[in-house]
Image (tube, rainbow, N blue to C red):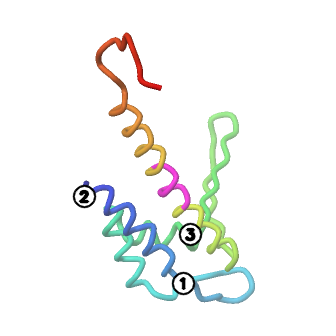
Amino acid sequence: MDAIFRILSSVLALGNVEFTPQGDDKVSVKNPGVCEVVADLMQCPADTLKEAFEVRTMSTARAGRGSIYKVALKPQEAVDARDALAKSFYGRLFLWLVQRVSDNMKSDKNVTSTIG
């Protein structure tokens, strides 16, 4: 039950994360305190979450060699990343709850007659 409340709280708190444009093609988290609260609820490092909102990590792999590139997110891309994270958390929680309800509604016995 605690995990459900943590996920719901983090989804709601994610909506409070705001961004400050740093030029045309860069963004930073405007309120890092909120980001720390969300990271605590998600049980992940706050720096990792902050970086996920500010930077997109891309990797290439060619013939055994690979490169990792970090590209700064634009303001709208940062908002989209925040919203996608909230949507993903909420969607997974919803599917998990539906599965749990479905599993608990199944009958363990063979039903020979029904009403209706």
Task: From this view, report whether residue 69 is shown above or below residue 49.
Answer: above
* Tag 2 near tag 3, CB within 8 Å: no
**Most extreme residue toward the right, as rendered?**
24
Discs 1, 2 touching: Cβ within 8 Å: no
Magenta-drawn segment: 87-92
Q: Is 22 in front, or is 109?
A: 109
Q: Tag 2 or tag 1, which sits nearer the N-term?
A: 2
Q: Quadrant of the N terminus?
A: bottom left
Q: Is residue 25 left or right of residue 4?
A: right
Q: Which residue is mark 3?
A: 82
- The residue beneath circle 1 is 18
Q: Residues within 10 Å of mark 3 (few under 14, many from 20)?
A: many
Q: Quadrant of residue 62?
A: top right
Image coordinates for residue 89, horizontal then vertical, percent: 47, 56
Query: On the picture, is 72 further left or further right than 18?
Result: right
Label annotation for residue 92: none
Q: Amino acid at mark 1?
A: Glu
Circle on res. 2: 2
Residue 108 falls in image quadrant: top left
The residue shown at (55%, 71%) is 53
Q: Earlier in the sequence, mark 1 or mark 3?
A: 1
Q: Earlier in the sequence, mark 2 or mark 3?
A: 2
**SS assignment for the magenta stretch, majority:** helix
Q: Residues within 10 Å of mark 1 (few under 14, many from 20)?
A: some
Q: Secondary structure at mark 1?
A: loop
Q: Is residue 109 above or below residue 5?
A: above
- What amino acid type should be assigned to the residue bearing mark 3? Arg
2 or 3: mark nearer the eye: 2
Measured Cα–Cα span from mark 1 to mark 2 = 26 Å
Q: Amino acid at mark 2?
A: Asp
Give the residue at x 48% y 44%. 95
